[in-house]
Image (cartoon, rainbow, N blue to C red):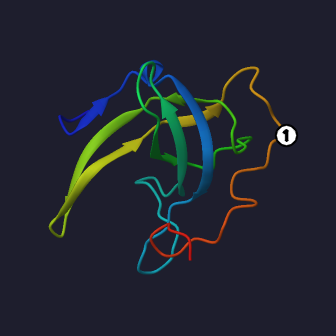
Amino acid sequence: MSLKNLPLDASRMGIALCISVEPKTDLETGAVKADRDGVPQWTVSVAVRPEASKAAVIEITVSGEPVGLGIGQHVILNGLEAFWWEMNGRSGLAYRAESVTAAPGSVTGLVPAGEGEAPRGPRGGVK
């Protein structure tokens, strides 16, 4: 771990609900991005609400397709870390995790992530 990669205590995130799961793609080519080992990367959007705080949506990158997640399902964020990025005069905070899994006892059979969503434009917004 470098100083740029900061491990986070996911248990302090409070309630975490899956919003969507989709392949992480290159904005210019549309190709699915891969990690250093060639494993395809996925973006899991998660709504979090720490105790006594406002809710927020964070997008978490994971290597390999998360299986068994549905929209609205409680999830566990395993090996969550944050890192600061800078590129072409822009910068921001990004998140990645070893995995995002369904919480034990969470409701299954919900709408699978990616189904029933509005079409998305090149930057993730609705067309």
Q: Is residue 52 left or right of residue 114?
A: left
Q: Is residue 84 left or right of residue 81?
A: left
Is residue 14 positioned above or below 95 on the image? above
Task: Looking at the picture, tell me which residue is in the foreground, 12 or 77.
Answer: 12
Q: Amino acid at mark 1?
A: Gly
Is residue 37 positioned above or below 106 on the image? below
Quadrant in which the C terminus appears = bottom right
Quadrant in which the N terminus appears = top left
In the rendering, at what x and y percent does residue 35 appear? 44, 54
Name the residue that disc number 1 marks: 109
Q: Residue at x 62, y 41 (%)?
A: 18
In the rendering, at what x and y percent does residue 109 appear? 85, 40
Is residue 67 positioned above or below 9 on the image? below
Which element carries disc 1, helix, strand or loop? loop
In the rendering, at what x and y percent does residue 3 appear? 17, 34
Q: Residue at x 46, y 37 (%)?
A: 97
